[in-house]
Amino acid sequence: MFEGAGLDALRVQFVALTVCFVLCALLGIERQVHHKNAGFKTHILVGVGSCIFTLVSAYGFHPLLHSTVNIDPTRIAAQIVSGIGFIGAGVIFVNNDMVRGLTTAATIWLSAALGVACGAYMFPLAIYALLLHYLMVFVLTPLAGRIPSRGRGDRILLEYEVGSAVMRKILTVATERGYKTTVSATKQLDTGKREIVRAVLKFEGPRSKDALIDALASIPGMRSVEYADADALE
């Protein structure tokens, strides 16, 4: 697959890098749309970098080849697999026993895999992997969210304005109704006009959360209250 040199080899390399760029951009756009920590640029850089490493491994050392030198083109690709874990670990956070960022870390891993596949000129495999990713995100994940499970509905996603003492009022309302409240995660958003806090809270109590949600929604400064998805604030 990697035989040849000169302009033919250069054309193969450029095609591989271009296809990798497009596929990783499509992968990163999905994360960007969902406002995740690692988005468009990160996935492109990881994928293109992996592709370049793979191409260098396959093409870069041909001038050194002779009867006494043996080069294994898979060695650099193998190091990509282990090395990309450091970037993935950087987007995983643990806050009050809630782990966030696992899906984004996995897509970074997938971006590196797409880069290696494109560098090896395995375009059909890379394209099919991207299609499976979109199938998982937009079809299977919503379906999985409808499966009943124990403890489902315990967590509630809230958005409220900063400076209105909303969190104190939330705790007061929940306590008055007999709920134990735990803050699972928070994230501050800058809308350009007012600072907004998006928070996931876990409410433990004997009754349905519907009445609690109505009470929370009536708090001044509260923008939205809804049941949290499985990947809320991921």
Image: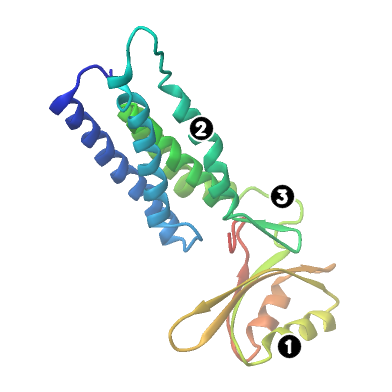
Q: Between 218 and 166, which is closer to the camera in this rendering?
A: 166
Question: Residue at horizontal 41%, vertical 13%?
Answer: 70
Q: Quadrant of the C terminus?
A: bottom right
Residue 80 in the image: above or below residue 121: below
Crowd rating for badge 1 (residues with CA inside 10 Å; few <14, some 14–19, many 20+): some
Q: Which residue is the site of mark 1?
A: 169
Could you say whether the residue bearing mark 3 is in a helix, strand or loop?
A: loop
Colour scheme of the rendered structure: rainbow
Tell which residue pokes out farthest to the top in this image: 67
Mark before the other along the chain sequence, 1 or 2? 2
Left or right: residue 184 versus residue 109 is: right
Left or right: residue 118 versus residue 139 is: left
Please state the total of marks drawn on the protein image: 3
Residue 162 in the image: above or below residue 38: below
Name the amino acid type tagged 2: Gln
Q: Which residue is the site of mark 3?
A: 149
Q: Which residue is the site of mark 2?
A: 79
